[in-house]
Amino acid sequence: MVADIKERDKDVKLEELRPADILLIHTRRSLWGWLIRRGTHCYWNHALMVYSTDKIGRDYRDALVIDAKTDASIVLRKLSDYVSRPDKYDMAVKRLNDELLDGDRTINLLDNICRTAANEVRPELTARLVRVKNRIFRQCTVIWRFTRRKLHKACQQPNMPWNVRPSQVKTFTCSGFVQWCYYMGASRIITINQDYRRHQSDVIFNSRIAGNPTPFELLTTTPADLANCEKLSWVYVVKHGVKYS
């Protein structure tokens, strides 16, 4: 999967990022991160999406990422908030396989995905109010969801309309937000150019989705689904500040 080629420089440069790249995060010393990893049997417990890499030179640590937090806030922040703390966070970069699309279609699709995500970002003050309101509820929901999964209990899907926004759903996951942005970004470009329709299934990363997805299925995608999806290629992994290519 990822060859053991280390860069010895601890101040590792983050190269080769592009908009809509998916970043998987492992959070140390976090009870909620541990619960998510335990429930999904995966090393990764959080997911971000790269929004912009413009005018930042060759080091991408200051790239802007869209972060759907556990407390339901969706914010725009610098990637350096994560990579500057190698004692706290590990990171992996995954990318939609290039062979699935040609050059122009890739650019158009990724642009639509990023715009879809950016439209959900809230001002910081609003995000803080949302955090205070939803923190306890959402954390309890995460625990309950994974407990049901461990007990193999069936869960009836709520009937969500397609015009629902993630910020209106108190139970969406960070990786579910990424999955939702990819699918909705592809769907919107299909309305303009039908040639993209055959690629719609290429942006479904949740292996539990069979046939046409529902909003609930998209929004409950886990970091494990993104990590295990073969439609997404591993670019590199950064552990304890060391990059493995």
Image (cartoon, rainbow, N blue to C red):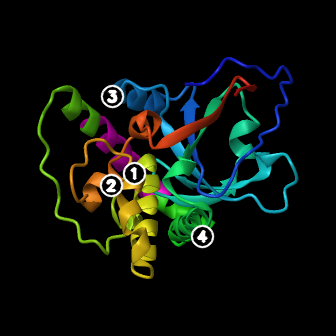
The reply to whether discs 2 and 4 touch (Cβ–Cβ < 8 Å) is no
User: Which badge, 2 or 1, comes first in the chain's sequence?
Assistant: 1
Q: Is residue 182 left or right of residue 157?
A: right
Q: Position of residue 229 (x, y in %)?
A: 42, 38
Whether the residues at callouts 1 and 4 have beta carbons within 8 Å, the answer is: no
Tell me, yes or no, whether the two marked residues, 2 and 1, touch with CB atoms within 8 Å.
yes
The crowding category of the residue bearing disc 1, from other C-alpha atoms within 10 Å (few below 14, some 14 to 19, many at least 20), is many
Q: Is residue 40 above or below residue 82?
A: above
Task: Residue at 44%, 79% (x, y): give it.
Answer: 193
- Secondary structure beneath label 2: helix
Tell me which label, 2 or 4, sits earlier in the chain.
4
**Three-letter amino acid code at the position of disc 1:** Gly
Q: Residues within 10 Å of mark 3 (few under 14, many from 20)?
A: many
Could you tell whether 135 is left or right of 118 in the image?
A: left
Instruction: Residue under label 3, please give it.
Output: 39
- The label on residue 176 is 1
Mark 1 / mark 4, whichever is N-terminal: 4
Q: Position of residue 242 (x, y in %)?
A: 75, 24
Q: Which quarter of the figure has residue 1? A: top right
